[in-house]
Image (cartoon, rainbow, N blue to C red):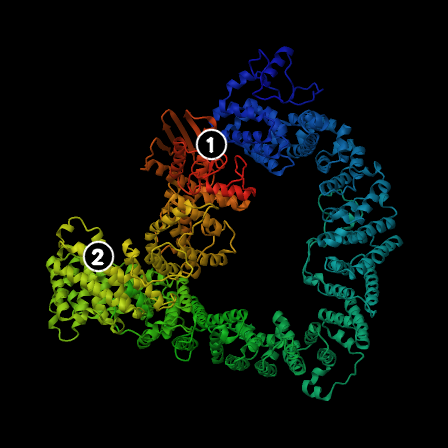
Amino acid sequence: MGGKNKQRTKGNVRPSSSGRAAELLARESGVIPGFVGFGISTSNEPGYVPAVHGAEEIDNLVDADFRLVLRKLSKRDAVTKLKAVQEFGAMCQERESDIVKGVLPYWPRIYCKISLDHDRRVREATQQAFEQLILKVKRNLAPYLKGIMGHWIIAQCDTYSPAASAASVAFQTAFPLNKQPEALSFCKDEVLNVLQDNLLKETADTLSDPQSIPEEEREAKYMRLLTSSLLALKRLLVMIPQTDREALGERLAHVLSQGKFWKYSKHKTPQVRGAFFEVVAALCELAPQLVEAEAARACSAVLLSIDDSDPVVLPPLWEAVLHILSSIEDCWTHVNARKGVLPKLWVLLKEGGHGLATALHPNMLPFISKLPAEVTEPKLDFCRSFFTSIIQGLSSERAVASPSECAAIVFATMECLRFLLLQNAGEEPEQRAMQTVLISEQLLPLIDKSLGNPALQSGPLFLQITEMLVSWEKRTTGNDAKTFQRLLVDFWDGLGSLCVGYVDQEQTEQVALEGVASLLQIMQNPCKQVKRKKSVKICFSDQEAKGQGEDPPSGTPPTELSESQGKQDSSLRSSHLLELVCQLAELNMVYVCERNSERHLHFLALLLRAFPKPQVFQVLLKSEDGKPEQGLEAELGALTKNPAVRFLLQRVVMWLRQDDRQDTDFLVDMVFSALHCCNSKGEQTLVLNHITMSLKWGVILQIIQKACADAGYLEACRGWLKGSVLGERLVGLAGELCAFGLKGSPSLSSPLMSQHSHSWPLISMALSQQHNNESLIGKVYVEQIIERLHATLTEAKGMSDAGNMEPLVSFICDVASNFFSSVKGCLLLAAAEELLLTIFQLCAQDQTLTHLSDALLQKMKLAYTAGVHSLVTQLGAGVTKGTFLYSAAVWVKTLLLSSTLNAKSLQVLVQAVQSLAETLSSAQQSECLLSQFICCLTPTHEEWVCLRKALPPQWVKRPLLCGRLRVTEEIPGVDLWKVKDMSRLPAHLCASAVLGKIIFIAVPADTQQEETHTSELPDLRHMVAEILYALQWCEEMEHCPAMLAEYYKMLQDWNIAEKTHSNSSAKAGILETLFTRSREEGALWSLTLASYIQNTKPDASIIKSHCGNMESFYPLSEQSVCTIQVLCSSLTAAEREGLIALSIAELLNWQEKEQDCAHSVWACLAVLHCCLQAETPVEEEILLAVMATLLEWRNSREEWFLFNSDLGKASAAELALPVEMMCFLCWLVDRSPTVLGSTHWDFLLCSMLAWLETASESSGAFWNPWVQQFVCANCELIVRLTDFFIAPPAGVAEQLPSELSSEWQEFFVEGIHNLLLPLLVKIPVEFPEPDEPLFPMAVVVAVGKALSYIPIQLLTQNKLPARFVADQKSSLPDALQTLLNTLGPLLLFKARPLQLAVYHMLHKIMPLLPESDCESATAKFEDEDEEEPCLSPPAAIMTILTATEELLENILGGVQVGEFAVVQPLSMEHCCILGYLLAWKLLLTFFKAAPSQLRVQYSLHLRKTRALHKLLLHLFRLMPENPALPGQPTEMASKDPKSFFTENLSLSLHKTEGLQCEVPHLACSVYYGALKDLPAMVRLWWNSQEKRVFSIVDKFTSKYVSSVLSLQEITSVQSSTQTFESMTVKARSATREVIATYSVDDIFIELVIQLPQNYPLGSISVESGRRVGVAVQQWRNWMLQLSTYLTHQNGSIMEGLSLWKNNVDKRFEGVEDCMICFSVIHGSNYSLPKKACRTCKKKFHSACLYKWFTSSNKSTCPLCRETFF
């Protein structure tokens, strides 16, 4: 109820202190409090932990930090105490020893308290802290030991093991082992005081405060203290010397004399009882005289608790029982054994010890050995009761469930039985009666019980019986020979009757027969018993048997048969066993022969397995005819007289041949039992050869399996396995199986298939099993089988319906796999290599051809991998003709060159070859094997050339149009460019993929030098060059087919490019090869060289060494030009200047060239342009000379310029020259425009326009890449000129010809755009499919970029053919309407550059369109008497929106609002969404440019069509959840995050990177524009949404948009140039407020406009500032008006304020409010009240009256209620 902050009583200025209270108590009463407990000791002995008083003084003597920790230790909270103890330990470890010593006087009291704490973590931490204290103070602890030791030894016996362990560690730290008894002796009295008080005085309530601690916790603490104290007492007795124990004798006797001590034997807590019995056992052992003094109590406490079966109590209890029996001779006088002890014991034994047999039953033998005669009389009854009880325990639930429990009971039973038999070994009547009871009434019934119980059969019982019999047999030669001979006879008679009883039943249980067989087998061979838990066998001596021993029972009695002395001593030597077996076999045979008992047949097999003796077989043949067949005698000779062989041939073989027999395993055992009786291996082989011809395959398989599993059996069968009889049968079997498999088996369950279910495993085993590195069967037969399997697999591979071949292939594969992996040297056989090749070929082919399952392919892969590994590791194979590796390489190469592979089949082939290569790499001894294989696999130089020529040439388009390559080869026809798909991969790509995957297995890393690999892979540089060539071809392919894209992705996933670039071992050689190929062939090789240089970045010196002298490139060829273009950026400035000089010289002397003059000047211009682009300095004279040359060509070689030519008929070389001219002129305009004179400018501009006219007339040829290059270069020249004339460089304008700029503006601009605009419109007409490879996308980009400069007047006065739509309402001029109708539909054309080009042009004219609606709308509004009119935005744009809304609903309909829909760039969906969003961007631009009056009409139309509603729903599917700009550095993203709302969207036509973000960014841009320009409509939509959407929109807008929009709104107010008469507007960006002050004459009004957090969704609050001269009601009306304007007008704050000011101005001018809306100016159409009532003369707005009449259904005046006319 209180607390630190509670108000104290008046005058009480100091807080309470328990320390002061203790001090006051001591001072006033003069008595120092005793032990800090809650009960007061009645003892007169001094307190053992004196309480410390004078706390204030003591505290001052201790270190301040320790003082704080010690105070925390007295807290009640467990966590606080735990932290305090840990802190105390840490401080002891860290502080100086002198400081720590200061704590010692106060440690005993604290330790004694917290070492008994209820929380076990605190107790453990206390001992750990104590250890740290001991380590620091060491010997200084000695003066305080007596105060600590009692609780310390209790802590070592803590019931929580970690705490006890920590206390013991601390004790060992303080005292070495040899000093520990001495330390305890020193404190023995104090320790005993503590233990005595705990055991005899303390209670749960005195130990803990009953007022504050729950009863459950008090009880638990007390029980723990009792247990620990009892265990501590035992520890004390054990550890102190005998002299000290004697010194404590009186005090211990006092403890034992207390009744409370002995009551602990009946305590309710098992831990206390267990500890008590441990103390009693220790007292009996160490101080027996003390126990004898209390014998009556001790015997009663211990012996009467004999039935306590708690797991904690039972072990110490029986230890105490045995000690009591040994220590107190007259113990049985104090208890009644017959009534109080033995009945309890019988009950306990009957219940199997309650699951504690492993602890209880080992004590039975010592227990009964200590029982005196008076307790066991009459002996027969005692023995019956004892054994009946203990054997009954075998049926208890736990004994049945636990083998260990059962074994413990069996061991105890047999030990006690053998002990009692030895005690009663004599011929006296009493002894003979006892023997009869033990054997007939106990042992034989136990055996009988076990025969029906599998658990007992598998236990140690049979072995124990055997050992007992062996022991009796040994004693038949001693003093008691007669007795033991009689015992053996009695036992065997009884056992024989028992076994015969089981066998002589037709319906006997199989378990019983197996039990009989198991018993007989163990008796025959005891060493084969598997599980034995007990390693010592007990047999008491005669002296022990008479009970005269005095040794304590803690040790075991002397042993007579302690350990097995060898196999010969452990087995039975008498003939009783064999006689019994023969008797049982003869009886059993009757049931087998006469009644066909399957159970008895199994039993016979078990008997013969254990007893393969001629006597047994002779007994089995008694009922048979003694004469064998004549043929048999001739074949087997004397063997026919062998009873075992005769039984085998006459009986076993017949049983094996039975068709309906399923289980033959046990019969095969009979075969081996019969073979065991043959005299030689030759005889065994003869017998097996004879029976082989008549046995089923499954039986033969079982014979071989058993032979392989047992060395003895294998030795018996060796001759038969290697012989011709079995070998030829197996070869015939393989032929049958293969023939059967080739017929095709639809079902594995068919009769024929089940007939051969054992055949394939048999073949597999015969081939793969080896012994001593030799095959199981003859080598010649192995080869024949393998040849047959290979022939079959080859035949199956070529069959069309290979799906039915799967079972056959699977079987052959299993056989081959086992054979390859198991048999050493298996591939020495030619047939084996051929089989391996066939399996490899099946693995390397696509499943669509082989029709094999994935599982089977995996199996085959493992098979050929095992075969290759075996081939390389065991035989060291080479790659020569005829070998497996050579054949595999040739087959793969042929497959690669055949061009029949698709991406999937190539992948399968690559995986197979890779697996083969990896196996070779891991298995090869030298490094050359894999390299030789790769060389065989690689195409020759001539083959590579053919493969490169076969590659489709479409790759040229991309580098040509990007300007990375100059090619003038012949133009392929239009049909070639139409190809969109391919069904097969080019062979070059296939070969490159395979080599790329495996050469880096042979050349793995950068660590090895190049020379090493040159010898291994001499073709490495050429292979890598071809791989790079294939990669470059894939990279350059535009509109690549799906198969090619899959192939390229596959290579990227394999990281082949990275591996080729990073492999340094052949880098120089690869560069040299690529350079040579580029000089010789150019084209794609040059691009490959460029890519390699870019990725590997070789030194300039290496490139210089390859280039040599620049003059070597001249005279220039196309290949030289390509190479120079690639190397130009890597050359020095001097080298580039040299190239320019050489090119100019050749260019100026162009007339000297007699042949191919045009090609020469093209090459020179190309090299010149490359050098100029590389920033090579050049003199003006050279440029002027080139320009002069161009003018000269204009006059003399005009055909080179292709003016007014049909570009579709021009060759690539003819088109390339004007392109180079355009490029050169572009560079001049950019870099050196001042060089050009008036003539040059005229030539340049006229040529540019002439080229454009030529291009516009040849639009049908735009499919041609060279024509596209021509148009792109022309458009680039137009863009550069436009940029130049819009913003000429500083100082250049003055140097230009005077009339140039005006000519450009007046003539050329109009001429250019009047050609470009129709050209752009014409392209989608000529090429309607943008996905086709023919579509001139590059031209669209170039023309669109040029048209982005088109002046607005050329758009409004365009020369496009007129295009109008029927029923389209429009007030626009015809030219504008035509423009909209022509360009509008192109917004949805699936070509992104065209969409953006159209958007940029329409964006320019959008602000002009509302002007056309102004006049008609004004006239219409003046006469409008009805509902507010709505006006449609431009119909062409609205048509686009209507067309795309349904498409977007289909695309995005499945995405919930608020979830982000990912749009694939450049897909049909991307095009549709892009057009939709661009149309909205245009519409928002149009809306923003419209005056306020028109905005209302437009917004009303949008509301009616629900266009904005649909837009906003789509936007919240297209905007990402986090619109952060991708690619921001982490630091910037956290400090100044950029988002799609803060950054402007760049809608560039030629943008190719980051298209993934274009739609999300555009969606954010449209949403931002809608919030900015249509805030009222968005707010209206937001308020109408369901709760989930409402919340999503609110959170998103507040988090990402509101801050940006609010800042812009405030900034626009601050930077606004708009001024108002009599009103000033200010803005505060920090508080997001706008303050408007209106003053007229004496009237002063101040309004504060506050933007909400979720602006503009939330309502803008308008608050009152100062006001003077305005009535309250009027003031409220005006505030309401402003709030209404800002909430419901689609405009900015400035526009709302302007509208509000006009309203107020009109009010002051005398215009009365409309009495419906209470405003002068109408909120929507901005009209004044004009419709007056004839009765009351009040005026109303027309729109307000219309709403009044329609909503009230009346035509009366709202004010006077008269009819309104």
Q: Earlier in the sequence, mark 1 or mark 2?
A: 2
Local packing at callout 2 (Cα closer than 10 Å; few below 14, some 14-19, many 20+) is many
Residue 1687 visible to the viewer: yes
Residue for point 71% across, 45% down: 555
Q: Is residue 686 above or below residue 1619?
A: below
- Residue 1042, image quadrant: bottom left
Image mark for residue 1281: 2
Residue beneath the point at 73% across and 73% down:
613
Q: Position of residue 1432 (x, y in %)?
A: 42, 52
Please say if 494 is above or below 1635.
Answer: below
Residue 843, position as x, y percentages in the image: 48, 73
Distance (Cα) linking label 1 and label 2: 61 Å
* Left or right: where 617 falls relative to 709: right
Where's the N terminus, which quadrant? top right
Question: Circle 1 sits on which residue?
Answer: 1677
Q: Position of residue 432 (x, y in %)?
A: 87, 55
- Amino acid type shown at disc 1: Asn
> Which of the numbered marks, if any, corresponds to residue 106?
none
Pick the residue in front: 891 or 458.
891
